[in-house]
Amino acid sequence: MNRPKSEELFALAQNRIPGGVDSPVRAFRGVGGTPFFVEKGEGDRIWDADGNAYIDYVLSWGPLILGHAHPRVVRAIQEAAARGTSFGAPTALETELAELVNAAYPSMELLRFVNSGTEATMSAIRLARGFTGRDVIVKFEGCYHGHADGLLVKAGSGGATLGVPDSGGVPGDYARNTATLPFNDIEAVRDFFAMRGADVAALIIEPVAGNMGLILPEAGFLEVLREETEKAGALLIFDEVMTGFRVARGGAQALFGITPDLTTLGKVIGGGMPVGAYGGRRDVMECVAPLGSVYQAGTLSGNPLAMTAGVETLKIIEELGLPEALDEKVKALSEGMADAAREAGVPLTGACCGSMFGAFFQEGPVRDFTGAMRSDTERYAKFFHSMLKRGVAFAPSQFEVGFMSSAHTDESVEATLAAAREAFAEL
Ligand code: KE4
């Protein structure tokens, strides 16, 4: 499959945009080669600048649970645009979307819209610190919560609980207050809270990890987070930017029956337009300006186009019984991939949760970041390109996940599995 047009566009992009991309993962550094430039998407497919079609399981990293260019969503955005694209003043649309979100996330008694998942988690953390008057934040290795300074932090050397920067430009001072623990490690959580629980403003977690590949919480893990934060007077923040409306209608908090104090959302609730949200307990959210001292603002927050796309998307999710209606299709794909890998003698450890799925190129089991890092990324890269040339687009990194949409047909899933059988055989 040739992509001369993408090669040319990539060269041009690199003249003006760092790495030629507006988000690093898109540059294919994780799998090598030149990224394809997309011209259009429709249903479960995208077309690149050279006219090649791909069955798309990236779906803009999660938002497009209805597939690309759903006619009703497109029409709603067009009609909204004709009435003006942004007012910087309240509209009824924001309340309409807030009510639709609250109906699925009753723990979000009050919520505020922002423009990205990063803004949502950054705001939730500032709010937790403002509400508790404490500084320390706990996160987990391999969990990604966007690129706010205090969250680009990794565990210090040795058993040190103090964080060190995980990115250039993050001052040590910002990292100092973020502790990083191993995912699924109940003992590490209990030990940390025994030592420093009184200093913790909040613990933030992806309740189903999707940024180190797909890793599910082990039995009892999330319950311990709820118990330890409660005991310490710290807030529990579920970062459901990816899992929201994806692992279940009500997210991981509904799936596992755990009520966090704050939740962050993004992706699906914007239906492909820039939307993030943070919300939770009324008493906590009432600390947000203009009600309280915790400042947060945004020119385009709650803008009518994004709200319209979100409202239409959540209405269709309701009508189609998503994401639960996708469970069987995801299981068929995940199990089919496992069978294909087994037949070809390729070690593969797959997992799925609602409309998300992942697979590590290794024997497994994989329960945390250290385990995920044992994966054979070379083999993943070969598999990725083998699938791409057969017209199937998975994530250009072993440490991402795949997403299903209501637009994916059984024929597309079958075609994907046929391509996978050939791709695994090539490995
Ligand atoms: P954004 O700022 O990218 O909208 O959201 C940040 C974020 C927060 N929390 C979770 C759990 C997330 O998965 C994300 C963003 N996810 C990545 C995909 N792994 C976005 C893709 C990208 O960075 O280009």
Image: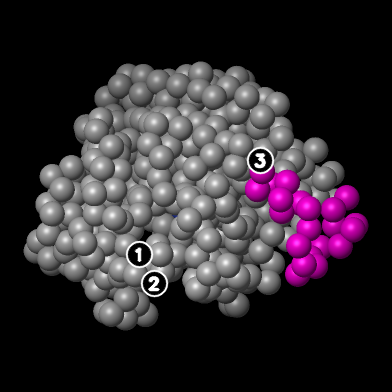
Amino acid of disc 1? Thr
Residue 100, labelled with which disc?
3
Quarter-wise, where is residue 404 in the image?
A: top right
- Give the SS element for disc 1: helix
Residue at 66% from the left image edge and 43% from the top image edge = 99
Q: Is residue 17 above or below residue 259?
A: below
- Which residue is more in the foreground, 65 or 175? 175
- CA separation, marks 3 and 2? 31 Å
Q: Pointer 1: what residue?
A: 132
* Front position among marks 1 and 2: 1
State whether label 2 is within 8 Å of ligand 1: no
Say which quadrant the N terminus sits in.
top right
Mark 1 and mark 2 lie on one chain; the one further toward the N terminus is 1
Q: Is residue 92 found inside the magenta-colored segment of the image?
A: yes
Residue 149, labelled with which disc?
2
414 to the left or right of 138: right
Mark 3 and mark 2 lie on one chain; the one further toward the N terminus is 3
* Front position among marks 3 and 1: 1
Q: Which residues are magenta?
A: 79-99
175 to the left or right of 326: left
- Residue 188 seen in this snapshot: yes
Residue at 27% from the left image edge and 79% from the top image edge = 172
Q: Residue furthest right?
A: 82
- Residue 343, given in percent of the width and then of the height, sits at 32, 19
Residue 370, labelled with which disc?
none
- Which residue is more in the foreground, 36 or 211? 211
**Are the residues at dot 1 and dot 2 in contact (C-beta closer than 8 Å)?**
no
Quarter-wise, where is residue 298 in the image?
A: bottom right
